[in-house]
């Protein structure tokens, strides 16, 4: 596995978590907008890290690569698509 793939995905998940926690305790509209922006950057980094990592890393098994693509599609599709909301 390329060394940057877990770093990008981990940073994306961390930003997603920070955005959600910040959104729960936000009391103004500006704070909610900031939390939403942080959450969106986290989704972007995690999704793009999984998708590009699955396409580039040819050393991984094909099932692992397919799982990475599926996880990226679910992450971006469900969270950005609005089917699942994770902020209060």
Image (cartoon, helix red, strand yellow):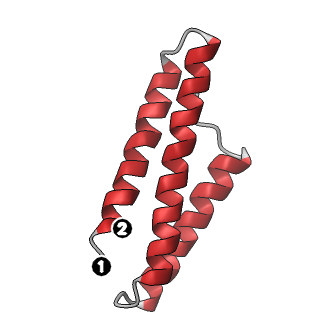
> Is disc 2 placed on a helix, strand or loop?
helix
Neighbours of disc 2 within 10 Å: few (<14), some (14-19), many (20+)? many
Neighbours of disc 1 within 10 Å: few (<14), some (14-19), many (20+)? few
- Expressed as whole percent of the image width and height from the top left, the position of residue 68 reads 48, 73
Q: Which residue is mark 1?
A: 1
Which one is in front, 87 or 45?
45
Tag count: 2
Q: Looking at the image, which residue is at 72% across and 46% down?
A: 83
Mark 2 vs mark 1, CA separation in Å: 7 Å
Residue 88 shows in the view: no
Q: Are marks 2 and 1 in contact (CB under 8 Å)?
A: yes
Q: Which residue is mark 2?
A: 5
- Expressed as whole percent of the image width and height from the top left, the position of residue 85 reads 64, 38
> Is disc 1 placed on a helix, strand or loop?
loop
- Expressed as whole percent of the image width and height from the top left, the position of residue 62 reads 46, 90
Q: Looking at the image, which residue is at 49% across and 32% down?
A: 20
- Quarter of the image holding residue 74? bottom right
- Expressed as whole percent of the image width and height from the top left, the position of residue 12 reads 43, 50
Q: Is residue 28 above or below residue 74?
A: above
């Amino acid at each position: 596995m390329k060394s940057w793939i877990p770093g990008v995905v981990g940073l994306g998940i961390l930003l997603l978590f920070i955005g959600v926690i910040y959104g729960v305790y936000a009391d103004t509209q500006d704070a909610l907008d900031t939390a939403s922006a942080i959450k969106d950057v986290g989704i972007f980094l995690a999704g793009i890290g999984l998708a590009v990592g699955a396409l580039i890393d040819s050393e991984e098994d094909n099932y692992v690569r397919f799982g990475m693509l599926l996880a990226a599609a679910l992450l971006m599709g469900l969270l950005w698509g609005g089917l699942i909301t994770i902020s209060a």
